[in-house]
Image: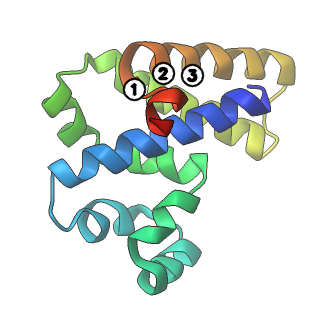
Amino acid sequence: MNSQMYDDLSFRLRAFLREELPHHSALWWDDLVMPFLTTRNRRNGEAWGAKLFMTLDLAELLRIAEKNWDLISRRHQFPSRVFGLIKNLQLARNAYAHRTCIDEASLWHTLDQISIDLLDNYIGCDRQDEAA
C-alpha cells in the first residue's frame, strides 16, 4: 500500500465511520468508539472527546469498524465478504507495521487491492465529496 492509498483509506474510512456511527447511538463516541481505543487514546478521548476521532490512525479505524461491524452491515446490508476485507486489511496492516511480513512488495500489493475493492465498492465517500 503506497502512502497515498494509506492516506486515502484512512480519510475515507474515517469519514464513513464518522457519518455512520451516530446512526446507531446518540452516544456514539462513548458507546461505539471509546471501548475500542488504545489505552493512550482512551485517556486522550476522555480529555478531548469526539474531536480525537479526526486524529485516529488506520489501525484504530479498522478496529472500530470491525467491532461495530454487525451494526454497520445490518444497516447497509453489506455482504459478509466486506467483513473479510476489513479483517484482511487489519492483518496486512499489522504485518507491515510490526515487520512480520516476508515479502513487503507483495504485502503492499495485497493492501492496495483490498483497499481499492473496499473503497470503490462499499465505503464510497470520495475526497471530492468531502470537500463539497
Kind of residue indicated by mark 2: Leu
Label 3 CA crowd tier, 10 Å (few <14, some 14–19, many 20+): many
Taking depth in this image into account, of 14 and 67 the one nearest to the observer is 14
Vertical position of residue 59 compared to residue 92: above or below? below
Extreme front residue here? 132
Q: Does the rendering let one see residue 109?
A: yes
Extreme bottom residue here? 47
Taking depth in this image into account, of 92 and 30 the one nearest to the observer is 30
Label 1 CA crowd tier, 10 Å (few <14, some 14–19, many 20+): some
Query: Mark 1 near mark 2, Cβ–Cβ under 8 Å?
Result: yes
Kind of residue indicated by mark 3: Ser
Query: Mark 2 near mark 3, Cβ–Cβ under 8 Å?
Result: yes
Vertical position of residue 21 compared to residue 49: above or below? above
Residue at label 1?
Answer: 123
Residue at label 3?
Answer: 115
Residue 112 shown left or right of residue 32 in the figure: right
Q: Does the rendering let one see residue 103?
A: no
Residue at label 2?
Answer: 119
Indicate the position of residue 38 as horizontal and vertical percent values: 53, 68
